[in-house]
């Protein structure tokens, strides 16, 4: 009786990679559709169609599995930004176009799933540590997307500060949109920030007075 030959090392590596990808695809899909609470290891195992042993081999803990989704979520967000940019090509105002594209991309389910992971990490030290590593690895991708959107503005004096503040702004706008469904309020806030950017871009950081405000003298009462 002939014995069945073992898979070649390259074949085994390909199989491991395929299983790893299937688990991450399942985790990302569940995060986007159902949220963090529903993205348990058991749910991902069933959704991916893998054994319990296979899942634990690739992701020994729930935190590691969730952190492993960051790279793929970042790719989703980058694709969303490209799609939003394509739909705004007729907007010739570089400030207005860039912020609207960024706000649109960061309000989509994939980005909200990423923010949800951040919220859970507040009380989960293992997830927080894993997310910090994953986010640090993904940061160049975020910077590349932002720099592409704001390319016409990169020579302005205060571009670096505007870049940092704008990322924080769209994060807050995305979270606010979860509870506040008013499109008119969102548009008004976005317009206010675009107006602010126009002023901030041409400020010279070296000339800004960053000294602490003086403590006012206490008024003596008779």
Image (spheres, rainbow, N blue to C red):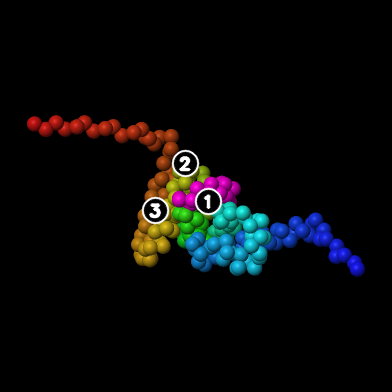
Q: Which residue is mark 3?
A: 193
Provide the residue span drawn in magenta. 121-141
Residue that mark 2 sits on: 157
- The earlier-in-sequence mark between 2 and 3 is 2
Secondary structure of the residue carrying numbered label 3: helix
Q: Residue at x 48, y 60 (%)?
A: 112
Indicate whether 190 appears above or below 125: below
Residue 202's tag is: none
CA distance for labels 3 and 1: 33 Å
Measured from the top left, where is residue 43 in percent x and y? 56, 66
Q: Nearer the viewer, mark 3 or mark 1?
A: 1
The residue sitting at 53% across, 49% down in the picture is: 126
SS at badge 1:
helix
Label 3 with label 1: CB-CB less than 8 Å: no
Among the two numbered marks 2 and 1 on one chain, the one whose residue lies closer to the N terminus: 1
Pick the residue in front: 174 or 143.
174
- Please rate how many residues cluster around mark 1, counting C-alpha atoms within 10 Å: few if below 14, some from 14 to 19, many from 20: many
The residue positioned 58% from the left and 54% from the top of the image is 61
**In the rendered image, which quarter is residue 14 located in?**
bottom right
Circle 2 or circle 1, nearest the eye = 1
Specify the quadrant that holds the N terminus. bottom right
The outermost residue toward the right is 1
Residue bearing mark 1: 127
Give x and y (percent) for residue 45: 61, 64
Q: Is residue 29 visible?
A: no
Magenta segment includes 130: yes
Helix, strand or loop at label 2? It is: loop
The quarter of the picture where the C terminus appears is: top left
């Amino acid at each position: 009786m002939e014995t069945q030959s073992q898979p070649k090392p390259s074949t085994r590596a390909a199989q491991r990679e395929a299983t790893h990808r299937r688990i991450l695809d399942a985790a990302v899909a569940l995060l986007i559709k159902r949220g963090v609470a529903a993205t348990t290891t058991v749910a991902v195992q069933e959704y991916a169609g893998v054994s319990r042993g296979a899942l634990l081999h690739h992701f020994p803990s729930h935190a590691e599995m969730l952190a492993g989704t960051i790279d793929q979520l970042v790719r989703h967000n980058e694709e969303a930004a490209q799609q939003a940019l394509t739909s705004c090509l007729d907007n010739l105002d570089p400030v207005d176009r860039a912020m609207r594209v960024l706000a649109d991309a960061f309000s989509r389910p994939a980005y909200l799933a990423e923010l949800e992971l951040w919220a859970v990490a507040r009380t989960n030290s293992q997830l927080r540590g894993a997310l910090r590593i994953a986010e640090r690895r993904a940061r160049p991708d975020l910077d590349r997307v932002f720099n592409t959107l704001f390319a016409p503005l990169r020579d302005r004096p205060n571009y670096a500060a505007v870049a940092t503040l704008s990322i924080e702004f769209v994060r807050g706008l995305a979270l606010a949109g979860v509870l506040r469904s008013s499109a008119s309020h969102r548009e008004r806030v976005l317009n206010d920030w675009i107006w602010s950017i126009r002023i901030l871009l041409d400020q010279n950081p070296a000339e800004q007075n960053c000294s602490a405000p003086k403590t006012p003298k206490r008024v003596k009462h008779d």
